[in-house]
Each structure stands twice: as C-alpha cells, then as structure tokens.
Image (spheres, rainbow, N blue to C red):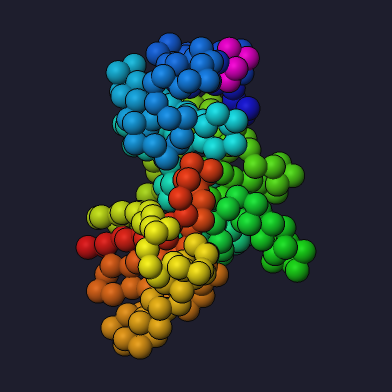
Amino acid sequence: MEGGAMGTHLLSRDYVSQDKVLEPLGAVTAGSQFLDPDGMFPNHIPNPEDREAMKAITQAVLNNKADLGIIFDTDVDRSAAVDSTGREFNRNRLIALMSAIVLEEHPGTTIVTDSVTSDGLTEFIEKKLGGKHHRFKRGYKNVIDEAIRLNSIEVESHLAIETSGHGALKENHWLDDGAYLMVKVLNKLAAARASGIGGGSKVLTDLVEGLLEAAVAVELRLKINQNHEDLKGGSFREYGEAVLKHLENIVASDSKLLKAPVNYEGVRSMISGTFFFFFWDPNKEGILIQPCVGLGLEEYH
C-alpha cells in the first residue's frame, strides 16, 4: 500500500483484515465491531446493501471519529465503505468512487456495470470523468464476462462492477473480489496522507464530487403469486416476461415516455425527470424463495 496506513484510523468488520493487514500497516483500528465469526449473524445481515448493516458501520465511524469504515459480506466478494463524515460508499456511489480511481489510472476506459445503475452515474462517468459507461445486465458474472468480451474486441475496460458491491478489475485478473476494491480505496487514502494532503477521507469524498444523485430512489421486488389465475398452465418466467413485454409496448406507444436508446435488460424509461426500470428477477443474491419482478424508481429535481 503506497505510503502505508500509518496513523490512519480505519474500522473493519472483519478480524483477518484488521489483525493481519491493517494493524501491521500501522493503522489504528480501535472501535472495529463484530470481529468474532458467528454463522448466526446476530448483529445484522452480512450485506453491504442492508440498511441496518450500513447504519451500524456508519455509527461506529462517527462514534470513534475514524477516517474510514469498511464492510464486507460473508465471503468478502462484496464490499462498501463509510467516510469520516458518515457518508456511505455503496451502490452507485461506490461505483462512482471506483470509476474515479480507475479512470485516473486508465483515462477513457469503459466501466461495465449492471443494469440498475442510475442515469446520474452515467453522466458522472462520461461527462465528469471522461470515461465510457457500458450498462449491461445484472449478475457479477455477466458484467465480468462482458468486460472481458469488450477487451477481446479492443474496447478497453478495466472495471466491472455491480450495485450490489461485487466488483472486479482487469489488473486483478477479473477476480470477483470486494477486498481488492477496498485495497484500491485504502491505497488512495494512504497516498493522500503520505503526500501531506491530510487525514480524514476528504480525498475520497472529493473524487465523487459532481455525482448527481436522485432526490428519491426506490427499488421494489414484486412477488409473483403462483396461485393467480394468469399463471395457470404457465411458468413464473413466462409470466414475468409477458409483464415486461406488456410494459415495453406501453412505453413504445406513449410519446411522453422516453425509452433508453441502449438497454440490455428489462424496460428502462424516463418521464419528467423520473426514470423507472422494470425487470424480471427470478432470484437476487439467493435470498428470494419466490420469483418476482423488480421495479426501480429514481426522481431528480
């Protein structure tokens, strides 16, 4: 890690990263929480997208006046962070941060993301950072495979990342590795301290300055009732795809609804500063027992 982590106050939710990595590098880790492994997860769901999980790490950062907090899921292939002011870096904001770091190293490169990323993120990557945003399909394997495919046809890509916190970099052999994402973030923090820019995590906050974020953002999962008469004689998938097709026809027939010009999954449209995204979702991170359709809404003022 460039400049080491000497004196930086970092909070972790993982014993190994604290004891074997952060402390030997000189980081102060006082205030780190829930370090004893427990497969029952008594404190909160181990998910960087979970509100309670993010609330817990945010409060720990603020209570301990830490420079940064980092959080992983159970197998450390998803991650998120919290800066010294309590600002969360997950979902679109984490992608914006990683895009800024990668585009400093590889100007103009293509950032591959899943399909539910925001239009504000697209504008940030392309207009503020000078990169290209390739919004593809959900699923970490989908975004990684697409980044590899783009490179094979001479479209340079160095980052494939999902809003869920899954992320892979070309320099790390396209491994789905949330810990490596955090190493990139920590390296940026350590380099700033070593160069005398100062403590805290302002350098990270500055990297996402200009990211347009929705005033209201909602993502819903609408479960399909397997006993509904419309499902008789058919499958969940057939029903979900029929719903998408019906909505697609509505969007195509209404001039007020602006359809996304490039879209690889679901139906994406905008009306009067609000965009919606509708998709068939048979499963999400393996936690849904019943298939559903997903609805994402974002409103920009």
Position in image of residue 64 (x %, y %): 34, 16
| Residue at 40%, 78% in the rendered image | 246
Residue 157 belongs to magenta span: no
Quarter of the image for the C terminus: give it.
Answer: bottom left
Residue drawn 58% across the image and 31% down it = 76
147 relative to 35 in the view: left or right: right
Q: Residue at x 61, y 56 (%)?
A: 143
State the predominant SS element of the stretch in magenta.
Answer: helix
Residue 99 at what x, y percent from top left? 53, 51
Q: Is residue 19 magenta?
A: yes
Residues drawn in magenta: 16-20
Compared with 170, 2 (above or below) is above
Q: Nearer the viewer, residue 187 or 272?
A: 272
Can residue 65 be seen here? The reply is: no
Which quarter shows the N terminus? top right
Q: Is residue 220 above or below residue 54?
A: below
Front-most of residues 59 and 158: 59
- Give how far across and how far down residue 47 sits, in percent: 46, 34
Residue at the (50%, 69%) spot, across then down: 233
